[in-house]
Amino acid sequence: EAGVTQFPSHSVIEKGQTVTLRCDPISGHDNLYWYRRVMGKEIKFLLHFVKESKQDESGMPNNRFLAERTGGTYSTLKVQPAELEDSGVYFCASSQEAFRDLAKNIQYFGAGTRLSVL
Amino acid sequence: AQSVTQLGSHVSVSEGALVLLRCNYSSSVPPYLFWYVQYPNQGLQLLLKYTSAATLVKGINGFEAEFKKSETSFHLTKPSAHMSDAAEYFCAVSVDSTLTFGKGTMLLVSP
């Protein structure tokens, strides 16, 4: 079974440009999460999809970030326009269980997209 | 709100020595606790998870962690380090469906 796939693995852009990150969750996982790790800091939650709906987007930094999950399958995270402080590693995770049984909620992570804004 | 503190951004051990990675958490409700490991160029992999069933949790690759409520700790241990254990380790807490992580500890293993 394929794991969580993210691409690109690395993106280098200039300040002011737009970048779109993509995440393909494990097949059948309704829950999809985005996290971000800025250099030297902890991994922080950005948002949570249940199927195509945004369950929790309390971690999104500002309105330059737009996440979508059309059809409840893959998700994209667009940063427009990118700023220097957006640099970091963006992780995607998916899980089968979420609110129904937290004890069974295991999040499986992708390898991340390293975003460098110059 | 919950938080996680991992003591030591880097821990160095010799091959065969005991591995001890420290994690303390803060939570207003009984938490679920996790340890994840990230090998170079790979995603985070779940090592083990505490869900209140047992205070001593055994994970993959010989790792285990003990939940101590009185100390609000969930330290990760392994009796004998292998070179292949060199990686970054993350402790995380969850009280809902999202994870709150510590800053991570890089484990360095020398021959």
Image (tube, coloured by chain):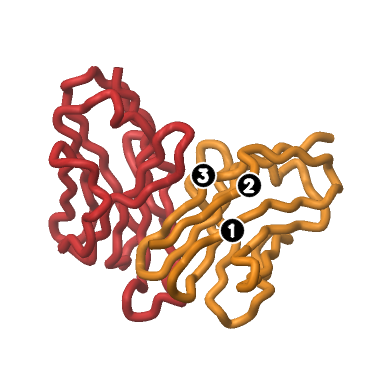
Chain colours: A red, B orange
Give the structural element (helix, strand or loop) at label 3: loop
Q: Which mark is residue B7?
A: 2
Q: Chain of mark 1?
A: B
Mark 2, secondary structure of its residue: strand
Q: Secondary structure at mark 1?
A: strand
Mark 1 Cα shell of 10 Å, populated few (<14), some (14-19), many (≥20): many
**Upstream in sequence: badge 2 or badge 3:** 2
Labels 1, 3: front one: 1
Name the residue located 17 percent from the left edge and 23 percent from the top edge. A17
Q: Which mark is residue B60?
A: none
Q: Can you tell which quarter of the image residue B57 is in?
A: bottom right
Q: Hey, which quadrant is residue B105 in on the image?
A: top right
Report which residue position mark 3 lands on: B103
Q: Earlier in the sequence, mark 2 or mark 1?
A: 2
Q: Label 3 is placed on what type of residue?
A: Lys
Classify residue A94 by image quadrant: bottom left
